[in-house]
Amino acid sequence: MSLVWVKFFPAQKFFSRKVLHVVSIFILSICVEQLNLIYLNQFIGLLLGIELILLFAVNYGFFYSEGRKSWGIVYFLPPTILMLWLFPSQIFLISVSLKILAFSDGFSAIIGRIFENGIKSHLRGEVGNSFWKKLAQFNHITWGSDSKTFIGSYVFFVSTIVILGDTQIPFQWILFSAFVLTSTELLCGKGSDNLFIPLLSFALIQFSKNHLFVELDYWVIVVGVFLVLMVINLKFKWLSQSGFVFAAILGSIVLMNGMSLWPLIIFFLLGTLSGKLNKSDISDAKHSKPRDAFQVLANGGGVLVIVLIQTLLDPSENLDTFMLVSVAVACSDTLSSEIGMRFGKKAYNIFTLREVPKGLSGGVSIPGFIGAFIGAFAIALFGGNEFGFILFWGIMGSIIDSILGMLFQAKYNHAGVLSDRKEGELVKGYAFVTNDLVNFGSNILVLVLYFMAPIIWALLS
């Protein structure tokens, strides 16, 4: 039906694709909700078969939209399969998560595009009309690789509130979950929201159910602090708009999970102050600019992963030490980079020890190692009896970050100088591997090694 629609109305290809998105994922949500668990394995097998067909079809250009292959269509089945496999007793919540993806994401795109087209028609018809120009600027949001609209995000927020009303969680939790999901959708690009929105929806509902003890008065305090910090950030511009929103989300989740916020505050202050050291030496396009959401998630994403695992697997498990290790890695790496660039006269390849340009990912120096120690030490102070472990793994995280950066991060030859900045010819690494991805990867890798260390030690001894 979608293909027939496009055949007769080719200009409406975007809308036909989004209607297909809404209808197909809604049908999937109904199938999940009505699923008899006796046939769970057969149903998962069926979804796997469909996924393989979709992968083949997209790869050969069957789904092509707006100048690129539409890979988004292959993203929503893997999270569905994963949730059904791990949490078969929660099929209602899985169905709700899919409905959020179907309706909130689909309707936001459709209504957002209609509103955007209306603004463009007014701009064409009334050249120089400042009202429509200002409205177009206000409506346009670019947090990630795709442009989104304020109207579309508002539709997503309201639709999510309506859908979450069936989950019987308190209204303040519904508002919070809708805000987090809307912010995440703004950040997603190239169809990746089809992957992240169902998983995050499911996790937020579970998190809400595990933290119903949070009183309404506490929520008022959190909102008040959020508004005060927003005003301060507008003044000093420490974080971009997206960076502030996700920093606030990270802080709220940490607080509501009963963890201390002080390690994150110390890291933020040390990272911000150290970032002021380098005004002439620039390592990449984001250096010395307000931190955006991707940088916040690259450094704080490990903490979110820890909370996610705790929420889904064992809410009673105390993972505070894991959180401190994650923050220690982020703080150690940040101070290592900034102090190394500011006070290091030379930087050296971590493998060959040959001199490399200062600020190049994978380059190390003595001042950089001192910075790594200071960063890890500052966070390890919160660890009590685990001080030594946190200090060690924090410094180890900085070293692993340098290793990953040298091996995989994209490096460009610009006027004969090797740089992380996307200027010139790609000569080493992979174009999609940015500093943010390396930071996040090193953080997760250290957490895995920290978890596995006692097991490995026991096997060796």
Image (spheres, helix red, strand yellow):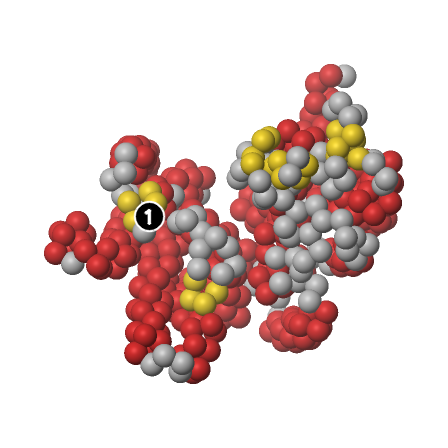
Question: Left of 26 or right of it: where is 247?
Answer: right
The front one of 392 and 403 is 403
Using the image, determine if residue 132 lies above or below residue 264.
below
Whether residue 54 appears in this view of the structure is: no
The image quarter containing residue 87 is: top left
The image quarter containing residue 374 is: top right
The front one of 47 and 10 is 10
Pinpoint residue 418: horizontal percent, then vertical percent.
Answer: 67, 36
Residue tagged by mark 1? 67
Pinpoint residue 411: horizontal percent, then vertical percent.
Answer: 62, 36
Question: Going by the picture, which residue comes out furthest to the top?
Answer: 460
The image quarter containing residue 398 is: top right
Using the image, determine if residue 217 lies above or below residue 428.
below
Question: Going by the picture, which residue comes out furthest to the front?
Answer: 415
Q: Residue drawn at (43%, 62%), measured in percent from left and top?
A: 148
**Callout 1: SS:** loop
Residue type of the residue flagged with mark 1: Gly
Pinpoint residue 298: horizontal percent, then vertical percent.
Answer: 63, 47
- What is the crowding at mark 1: few (fewer than 14 residues within 10 Å), some, or many (at least 20)? few
Q: Residue drawn at (83%, 36%), measured in percent from left and top?
A: 346
Question: Left of 48 or right of it: where is 7?
Answer: left
Q: Residue drawn at (64%, 29%), measured in percent from left and top?
A: 407
Whether residue 141 appears in this view of the structure is: yes
Q: Where's the C terminus, which quadrant?
A: top right
Using the image, determine if residue 3 lies above or below residue 214.
above
The mark total stands at: 1
Q: Residue drawn at (32%, 51%), measured in percent from left and top?
A: 66
Pinpoint residue 119: horizontal percent, then vertical percent.
Answer: 35, 74
